Amino acid sequence: MSQTRRAPYQAGTQEYAAVPQSPTRGMSVSGSRQYTRPPTRNASVRSNQQNLQAGRGAIAAGVASGAIGSGYGPYSYHPENGRDAGVYNGARFSSAPSEQFALPPPEKPPVQNTSTVPQYLWDKDPDLDDALHNPDIRGHDDTSFTVFSLRGWLNASALVILIVGLITLFAGFPVIYHYTHLPQKISGFNLGGINGTGQIPDFPRMPRLVDPETPETAWTRVGSDGKKYNLVFSDEFNTDGRSFYPGDDPFWEAAITTENGKLVITLTEETFHDLNFKSGMMQSWNKLCFNTGYVEVSVSLPGSATVPGLWPGVWSMGNLGRAGYGATTEGMWPYSYDTCDLGTFPNQTSRDGSPAAAAIGSPGGGPLSFLPGQRLSACTCPGSDHPGPSVSDGRGVPEIDILEAQVDVSVFRGQVSQSFQCAPYNYQYQFNNASPATTIDNSAVTSFNTYKGGVFQQAVSAVSYVDSANYNDAGYAAYGYEWFFDKKQRQNGYITWYSGGVETWKITSATIAADPISQVSDRLIPEEPMVRVLLDLQHAWPRPHMHTSI
């Protein structure tokens, strides 16, 4: 590549150098433009013109050499040259204004150029046109490449770290968190819940699920199935003056109270809703439910073991019905049935009155059932009123009695009836009482109840004698039942009752199996969430002895 340098200035020559804005590689650069003025008629004027041209030529030479204009402008270079030469100290014109005024205007104005950098200076300083201003960097030393460049590897590593970090943050972290915080296999139970280790939450200034005054001996027990049971709820009623009006207690609702560290339920003789007696009742409806397990109460029966007529009861029923509210139990109590067949029909009969076993199937030869039919049956059509989880699930309000007290007037000994009330019914209300389907622990204490049911219920029941010392606040005895069901293996369900802390009798799913005579299918060991009801009632047989009642 060749470059033509500008020729030295020759005095008297009319020319101006056009300094390029950017050098051009690969081609020769030279240039001079001549501007010839027209001849004049006056010699004196020609002389003045020559003088003026000589002054202008000196200025052009100064610009070309960098002596003039090199101290300012975008391409200033070596500003000390102009400053030291003193070219800016005096006038920049060699002739007087009067002489300039006499000059005629040029035919064409000279080309204007703001660059003050001479052409030859481009070759002396490469920074004047570096790679940032000229993208053509071929031939420069910094274009070399090697895969072993430390700087390159550091840059690439930083990018990889950033990308991996972003992927881990937005994709990997949720996955890692999910597998490091897996839920426990046993999450919790009941109000407030318990965790997998059996620990129970503490609610400040709130009643606890387990009463702190419950003795430690009651915290666990071994069931009839040989398994360990942990205590999840207890209430000792030790605080006097408790209120159970709606909204006053998280677990119970009643119009009764506590006295002397006990819950007191009172029966009074007074006219009430056209009836002669009024009794207190406590229940946990829609507040506290349980689903399988062991339930126990400590009770002192009212009156005396030799005083008939009182009928106190402690029992549980399905939460879909509310004791004392008849509309909630109509067509619901005491159904425990999950089959779509004749058992869901009113009176357990079809329109033509069949089967005859249901039409005349009671012990007296009358109708077997007066029930209106199962309201929430397995025959429910899609879109109909049904609490679920599926319209094909039969639902109801079965009843399990912890105790209903009575007196055996043949020997005047106190008894407790422990029963399962269910529907639809067996022919003549006769359940399967043969072993091993149904077992009695001690036949000297416990026997099957002679009352097996009526048109509104079938009673799978047994009665057991109780200690006469546990009456009228003189003594207390524990009564309860153990209940289990498995919806996937319903044949394993059972209920075992206890009186005085001792097992009395047991029923299984085979006890209430299908009856080919009444044409009903298996009744279920209850699968409904159950609520507890404690009450004291007056019964019509035999006539009560009111002077010994409290």
Image (cartoon, rainbow, N blue to C red):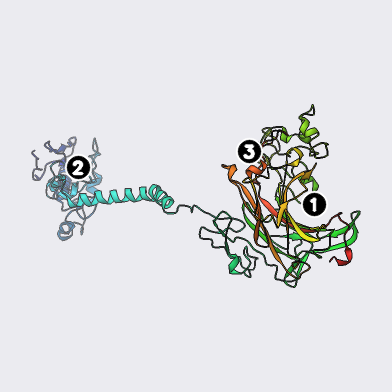
Task: Check disc 3 and report its element: helix, strand or loop.
Answer: loop
Whether residue 22 can be seen here: yes
Q: Mark 1 or mark 2: which comes first in sequence?
A: 2
Q: Hey, what amino acid is under mark 2?
A: Ser
* Rendered view: 498 above or below 515: below
131 lies above or below 263: above
Q: Can residue 242 be seen?
A: no
Looking at the rendered structure, which numbered label has been put on residue 432?
Answer: none
In x, y percent, where is residue 439? Answer: 64, 50
- 35 versus 215 height, above or below: above
Foreground of the two, 149 or 517: 517
Residue drawn at (63%, 67%), measured in percent from left and top?
211
**Residue in view at x 63 percent, y 41 percent:** 389
The amino acid on which the numbered mark 3 sits, given as a three-letter code, is Ser
Q: Which residue is mark 3?
A: 390
How many residues crowd around disc 3 within 10 Å: few (fewer than 14), some, or many (20 or more)? few
> Mark 2 Cα within 10 Å, few/some/many (few <14, many 20+)?
few
Which tag, 2 or 3, sits closer to the chain's start?
A: 2
Residue sitting at the far bottom:
260
Rounded to the nearest angstrom, the CA distance separating label 1 from label 2 is 105 Å
Relative to 68, is 294 on the left or the right?
Answer: right
Q: Which residue is mark 1?
A: 324
Mark carried by residue 22: 2
Looking at the rendered structure, the kind of residue marked 1 is Gly
Q: Quadrant of residue 36?
A: top left
Task: Mark 1 or mark 3: name the one nearer the start of the chain.
Answer: 1
Q: How many marks?
A: 3
Residue 399 on image: x %, y %: 72, 49
Q: Label 2's element?
A: loop
- Label 2 to label 3: alpha-carbon separation: 87 Å
